Amino acid sequence: MRKILSIVLTGAMVLSLAACGSKADNKTTDTDAGSSVTSVSENETSETEVPETIALTNRNGAGETVEVEFPYNPKRLAVMDLGAMDILDNIGYGDWIVGVSKGSSIDYLQGYVNDDSLLNLGNVKEADMEAVMESDPDVIFIGGRMSAIYEELVKIAPVYMVYTDTEKGVVESTEMNAKNIAALFGVEDKVDALVNDYNDRIDALKTFAEGKTAIVGMVNAGGFGLLGNDGRCSIIGNEIGFENVGVDADIDTSAHGNEASFEFVLDKNSDYIFAMDRDAAIGTNGAQLAAEVLDNELINQTEAAKNGNVVVLEHSNVWYTAEGGITALGIMLSDLENALLK
């Protein structure tokens, strides 16, 4: 059994959970949940009546809701999404993984990324199709970055796409995906045990955020892109409840945010400024850090800066590349707790 590197997180974020058969010795798996997923439960899968397949509602490469038939209790898993890898590790099915997208810097998944016995399926943006076919998977797991090759992948095996439903929000979508994936093995109850502890943490953050405004953005190549409540970091405005004054609710946010001037940020003068550091997240050589970019004459005139409320998300790599995982969600909440609930 492979060992997953433990995460050392500041403050009171760590809650160790022992997941049966998991590759991780110590996991941060606090989460909240609330969606209902139609699936096969353990009570319905006795030794004499185990289904051969299970149908799950998912999305295809065009973003359309589709019903997909998967083999029940699949044995060979090709994983090209970090959120899916996170979920499989938490519910104890990491040993079923036969190939992964490599190159990730996420600490708690390095046991998979660095395992030479697992086929290298490319990275989270580009697949090595020959390696995917060689892995002979029963199920392929992808994220939105792979949506363009969805139709090619389904020719190899059924595809489960991990995605965030903007109407449900990050927390409920994480539970939805986790329960769907767990349903493939009839272990949905494991998800409940992993995610129930998120409720109190989110409630405490919501209480803190009540009545407060924020601008949420991504620092990239020295610029600042505004993020709305429809994509990355949307948990800050949706579940946590800061009033996001940076982007009109009717305008979709682009993948890297809608570029804004620092004059605009000063004009909005929000109580808080939250920033994801994309360059740090992807390891851009020689890039200026987000904290340095935001330490300028205009930003320093904002009430947020004057009150020490400019927050660069500590684990930007998790926010940027691993959203959708159970451990990832616990880390994201911890970043907010460490910055706000001092």
Image (tube, rainbow, N blue to C red):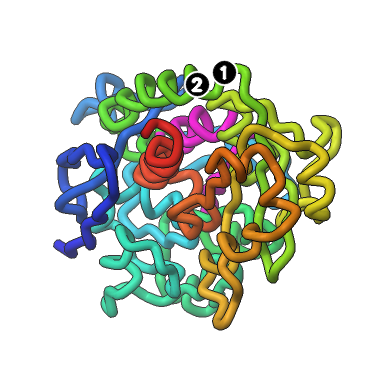
Q: Position of residue 259 (x, y in %)?
A: 81, 55
Distance from label 2 to label 1 (Cα)? 6 Å
Tell which of 213 and 254 is nearer to you. Answer: 213
Q: Quadrant of the C terminus?
A: top left
The kind of residue on which mark 1 rests is: Glu
Q: Residue at x 45, y 56 (%)?
A: 82
Which is closer to the viewer, label 2 or label 1? 1
Q: Residue furthest bottom?
A: 286
The residue beneath circle 1 is: 210
The residue sitting at 70% across, 42% down in the picture is 302
Indicate the secondary structure of the residue bearing disc 1: loop
Badge 1 crowding class, 10 Å Cα cut-off, few under 14, some 14 to 19, many 20 or more, is few
139 part of magenta stretch: no
Please say whether residue 55 is visible from this viewpoint. Answer: no
The residue to which callout 2 is attached is: 206
Relative image position of residue 145 (x, y in whole percent): 63, 59
Q: Residue at x 47, y 36 (%)?
A: 174
Q: Amino acid at mark 2?
A: Lys
| Along the line of sight, the residue nearer the viewer: 85 or 329 | 329
Horizontally, residue 85 falls left or right of residue 229, namely left
Q: Can residue 235 be seen from the camera position used here? A: yes
Q: Are marks 2 and 1 in contact (CB under 8 Å)?
A: yes
Magenta residues (range): 158-178
Q: Quadrant of the N terminus?
A: bottom left
